[in-house]
Image: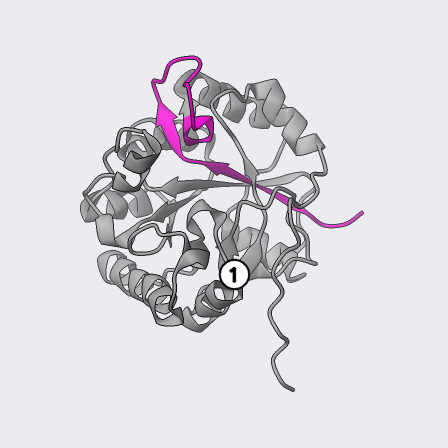
Amino acid sequence: MTARVHILMYHRVGDFPDRMPTHRGQYCHLPRFKAQMGMLRRLGYPVISLDAAVAGLRGETELPPRAVALTFDDAYVDFLEHAAPVLAEHGYPACVYAVAGKLGGHSDWVAPEGLSPAPLMNAAQLKEVQAMGFTVGSHTLSHPRLATLDSAASITRELADSRKVLQDVLGSPVEHFCYPYGSHDLRAVEAAAAAGYLTGTTCLRAAATPADDLLTLPRKAVHQGTTAFGLFWKLLARNAYKSAPIRRNPLPA
């Protein structure tokens, strides 16, 4: 049986109406989040860290069957308020991706899409999240669509400088990266490698396997309408990629 890990993608967790009119992938109602985490516990899905997932995908350790990793994009304050206590109750690890140039600010990138910007964690709150045992990763400096940027230098700055900012804040290495909107091209993937990231997560929908490049790992999105049963179904489904993953050229021998 092929080793695999289901990397789940969340954004906000909190008190939201049952049916948000648009962009439902941005929201997870707290009661549903609690039910989802409880389902993972009851059905025996092992929730592992991204570092453990990497070790398993590299073949350094054996991945447990049906392994799940949890990721949260943007580092909203409501992760600390709502998601973290639920995860701590279950002893589940998670990776939170922070937009390094907007710490303590708001998610203003959602305004053009008709959404209300929400507060983002500041440096002290990120350090609190880290102290709770969660991993903090980078989500660029300003949350751009990397594949649409004109210059490779702009992409490099978004990835390298965000890593430096977060490492200065946290006092420890930042090894995990997430492409905003899932937008990436070969330039972005190579910039992630050059910046020193261990992983890069996308919005390609599948379970991650050893065949995947660690810098273009797929994830399965959890949206506002996902029930505990819906999450169970996502974990059963062997989703195909929406598009072919980007492949880096092999390094010269």
| Residue 63 x %, y % | 66, 49
User: From the viewer's perspective, is 130 left or right of 221?
Assistant: left
Q: Nearer the viewer, residue 140 or 181?
A: 181
The spot of residue 181 in percent (x, y) is 45, 45
Q: Is residue 188 above or below residue 63?
A: below
- The structure's colour scheme is one colour
10 Å crowding of disc 1: few (<14), some (14-19), many (20+): some
Residue 77 image offset from top left, x and y in percent = 27, 34
Identify which residue is drawn at 61% across, 22% down. Answer: 230
Q: Is residue 12 magenta?
A: yes
Secondary structure of residue under mark 1: loop
188 left or right, relative to 83: right
Residue shown at 56% from the left, 57% from the top:
216
Q: Residue at x 34, y 66 (%)?
A: 154
Residue 46 shown in magenta: no
Check the picture and name the quadrant holding the C terminus.
bottom right
User: What amino acid type should be assigned to the residue bearing mark 1?
Assistant: Asp
Q: Position of residue 15 (x, y in %)?
A: 34, 18
Query: Residue placed at 57% from the left, 20% from the top?
Result: 228
Which residues, given as a range, are shown in magenta? 1-27
Residue 194 left/right relative to 172: right
Vertical order, 133 against 147 (above or below) = above
Nearer the observer, 58 or 160: 160
> Which residue is denoted by mark 1 in the rendering?
185
Residue at the limit of the structure toward the bottom, as seen here: 253
